[in-house]
Amino acid sequence: MEFRHLGRSGMLVSEISYGNWITHGSQVEEEAALACVRAALDAGITTFDTADVYAGTRAEAVLGRALRGERREGLEIFTKVYWPTGPGRNDRGLSRKHIMESINGSLRRLETDYVDLYQAHRFDHSTPLEETMEAFADVVHSGKAHYIGVSEWTADEIRRAHALARELKIHLVSSQPQYSMLWRVIEAEVVPTSEELGIGQIVWSPIAQGVLTGKYQPGQPPPAGSRATDEKSGSGFIARFMTDEVLSTVQRLRPLADQAGLSMAQLAVAWVLQNPNVSSAIIGASRPEQVVDNVKAAGVKLDADLLKAIDDVIDPIVERNPKLTTSPAQRP
C-alpha cells in the first residue's frame, strides 16, 4: 500500500481507502462485511470511510465491530453528517443541534473516542454556514474529531467554508466527490480551488458503481445480484451509466487494461489516483476478493500514452459539467 497526505495536512491516508456506503448493514451479511474489512486491513488499508446515514446508522456499527482490537492510532476513521438519521425535524442537516448530537451517536456506534475526519455530507442551504462551521469547531476543539471535510460541495462553498475554518483555527482538509473516468465534474472548478487551498480529494465511486469493471454488457440484462439490480444498493446512481452507448464504450477499454497488465477495475482505480489532488480512492466490496483485486491499483503509474488512449476512447461519454457537483436536491 502507498500513502499520501490528506491535502496539505500532516495526516497520511492509505492511497486506497475502504468505504461501506451500500454494503455493511444492508447489501451483505455482517459476516461477509467483517471479512471484507479484514481483507482491507490485510492489504494495508488503514483508512476507513462511513457515514451516519448508511444503512440507517447500521453501517457505522458494523464498522465499529469490525475494527475492534485494532490499534486505534494506526487507523484513520472517517464519517459524515447531514442526511436524516431519524424521524424528527432536527434529525438532519448541518444545524448545531444535529451536528453535536450526530457526532456523539457516530462515536458510540464506531466504538471510538474520536474520528480522524468529520465531513459535511452535503451543503445545508437552510442553515447559516457560520453556525455549521462553529459547531464543527467545537467538535474539533473538544477532541471528537481531528480534521473536518466536505462531500459534494461546490468550489464556492468550499472556499467560504475554508475561510471560516481558518478563522476558527480548525483544519478543513478534504473534499469527498464522485470521480471516475466517466464522471469528471470536479476537474473544472473543485480541483483547482482545492489545490489552491490545500484540500485533498477522497473520491467515491472510482469504478462508476461497477460499470468500469466491464461486467455490464450492452443489450444484455445486468448480472443477477449486481448493484444495478438491487434497489437498496444505490442503483439510482448507476442508472445514468446503464446505456448501450456507455457500456459499449467501456468495453473498448479492455485492451488498454490488458496492455497495462491490469484488470478493468484496477485500471479505473489507478486512473483516479493519477490526479495529484486525489489523496485517496474509496473502494467498496461485498466479497473479500474484490478488495484484494482493487488494492493492486495502489502505486500503479499510468504512462502518458495510455492516459491519452483512455481519453480517446471515452471522451464522447464523459460528464464534465461542474454544475453537477451536487445532487439535484442539494442545489439552491
Image: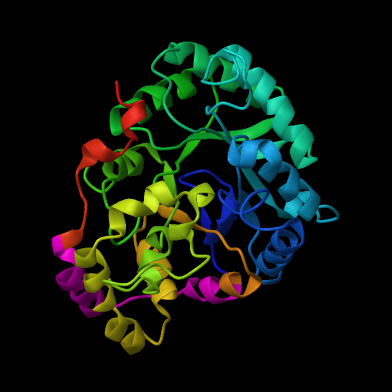
Q: Who's the residue at 16% across and 64% down the image? A: 315
Q: Can you say which quadrant of the picture contains the C terminus? A: top left
Note whether 7 is above or below 216 in the view shown.
above
Q: Is residue 318 above or below residue 1?
A: above
Question: What residue occupies the far right of the structure in this picture?
Answer: 69
Report the side of 327 relative to 79 (left or right): left
The N terminus appears in which quarter of the rendering?
Answer: bottom right
Residue 284 placement (x, y as % from top left): 55, 59
Dividing the picture into quadrants, the one containing residue 276 is bottom left
Tell me if residue 302 is in the magenta stretch: yes
Q: Main secondary structure of the magenta part?
A: helix
* Image location of residue 156, percent across then percent down: 29, 27
Q: Residue at x 40, y 72 (%)?
A: 213
Q: Is 47 a magenta residue?
A: no
Q: Does any portion of residue 143 appear in the rendered image?
A: no
What are the residue bounds of the magenta stretch? Answer: 292-316
Residue at 39%, 37% (x, y): give it: 152
Percent of width and height locating residue 73: 75, 50
Is 138 displayed left or right of 156 in the figure? right
Q: What residue is drawn where x is 62% and y is 12%?
A: 97
Q: Left or right? Give the position of 224 relative to 29.
A: left
